[in-house]
Amino acid sequence: MPGLGTSFGRGGATTAQQDLSNADAILIMGSSMAENHPVGFQWVIEAREKGARIIHVDPRYTRTSAMADVWVPLRAGSDIILLGALIHYVLENGKEFRDYIVPYTNASTILREDFRDTEDLNGLFSGWDDEKGKYDPESWLYAGSPLKNAGEVPGHAEAAGGHAKDRGGEAQDSSEFDSDPTLQHPRCVFQVLKRHFSRYTPEMVERSCGIPQDIFLKVAEIFSSASGPEKTAAICYAVGWTQHSKGVQIIRAASILQLLLGNIGRPGGGILALRGHASIQGSTDIPTLYDILPGYLPMPFFGEDSRTFDAYVKKHKTRTGMWSNFDKYFISLMKAYYGDAATQENDFGFNWLPGMILPGYALPVDGSVIVISFPLTSSDCVKSPFRSSAVGIVYWLRAPGIALCSASML
C-alpha cells in the first residue's frame, strides 16, 4: 500500500497479528475481522481479556461488533473524516506522545516558505501542474534540504505502483533539514498538521459520518489514551479501506494518527493490514506485483538503475533510516535466489534479474498464458505498457484448440 509505504518506507503491515495481544486498545475499521480473519482474531480476544478496549467501526453490525466494547456505525465512505477528526482530537487536546514524535518522526521538521496547503489553493497543495496532471514536489522540500536536482538522490520511478521502497517521489536528501524541537514554528510539520486537520471537528463527524458527538468523543478518548510510555493501541483494517477510491489517503491518515500517538514500532502498537487469499498479501510479500521484489525492493527498470548493480544501489540507498541497508537487503535476496552462485564478482546475480519494461518499449511476444487473472482489468495491467495491446491476448487465447479462460474473464 502506498499509504503505508509513504509513511514507513514499505507497504506492509507494521506488526504481526500475535502482537495485538499486547495492545491496550484496538481500532478495527474496514474489516469484520472475527468473520474474515478468525484465526488472527484470537489475539484481539486475548488483548480484551487482558483489559484492552476493542472499537469496531462499521456500517453493519457483525460478529466483530458483537465482540467489541464499542460498535460505531458510520455512513459508508466517510472513514477518512472520522480518522481526520481523531487526529484533530489528539492535536487539540495535547494527546500526542511528544517524547516519541520529536526524535522519531518529522513533526519538528520545518517546511519551505513556498509550501502551500489546501486552504490556500482551493483544495490543492502547492506544486500542482494542471497540464501534466501531477504534482511537482519541489515546494514540499524541508527547509535546509538540498533540492532534488542538486545531486544524485533516491527517487521514485513514475511507472511504479508505490509499493516499494521509493514511495511517491522522494523530493530531497532528507538527512539535512531545519527543525524546531519545541514544535512551535508555524511551518514545522506539527503546526501544519494542526491547521490542516482543524476542520475535522466533532460537528463534522456528526454531520458527515452520522456518528453522535458524544459517541465520537468516547471513541477518541479511549483510543488516544492508549498512548505514552506504558500504553499502545493498534489499528486493523482490510479491503474495506483499500478498495475505496481514496483508500491510500484513508490509510495515510491512520498512519499519521498512529505516529502522533507513538504507536509504531512498539509492542502492541502498529497498523495491521489484514488480507484475504494468498494473491492479495502474496502480491506484495512474495511478490507477484510487477514493480517490486520480495522485501518491497524496487524492481530494476530499463533505465539508469537497471544497468549495473552499483547504479541500482546508488539510486535507491539512503544515508539514514532503514533503507541505509538497502544493499544488504538486496544481497540477501540474491543469496536466497541463487545461493553460492551469487558472488561479488558477478554483482550477486544482478544481471540475472528481469528488468521492468517502460512505456514505449515493446517485446516480440507471440502469446501469453494467464492463470486465474483478469488481464484487462487488473491493476498490474493498467499500470503496464502491455495494457494498450491487451486486447490482442483475446485473439491468441481464442486460437483453435486453446481454452485457457472464459470470455467473462476478458
Image (cartoon, grey):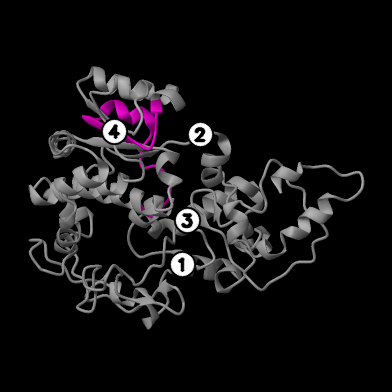
The percent coordinates of residue 193 (x first, y second) are 19, 59
Q: Nearer the viewer, residue 266 or 380?
A: 380
Q: Is residue 59 left or right of residue 96?
A: right
Q: Which residue is mark 4?
A: 73
Q: Which residues are magenta?
A: 8-33
Q: Is residue 48 left or right of residue 221?
A: right
Q: Nearer the viewer, mark 3 or mark 4?
A: 4
Instruction: Determine the residue positioned at 28% across, 43% down.
Output: 265
The percent coordinates of residue 339 (x first, y second) are 63, 46
Q: Amino acid at mark 2?
A: Gly
Q: Amino acid at mark 4?
A: Pro
Q: Nearer the viewer, residue 155 or 61?
A: 61
Q: Which residue is mark 3?
A: 164
Which class describes the residues within 10 Å of circle 3: few (<14), some (14-19), or many (20+)?
many
Q: Residue furthest right?
A: 400
Q: Which residue is mark 2?
A: 276
Q: Quadrant of residue 402?
A: top right
The percent coordinates of residue 85 (x first, y second) are 20, 48
Instruction: Determine the residue positioned at 15% across, 62% down.
Output: 195
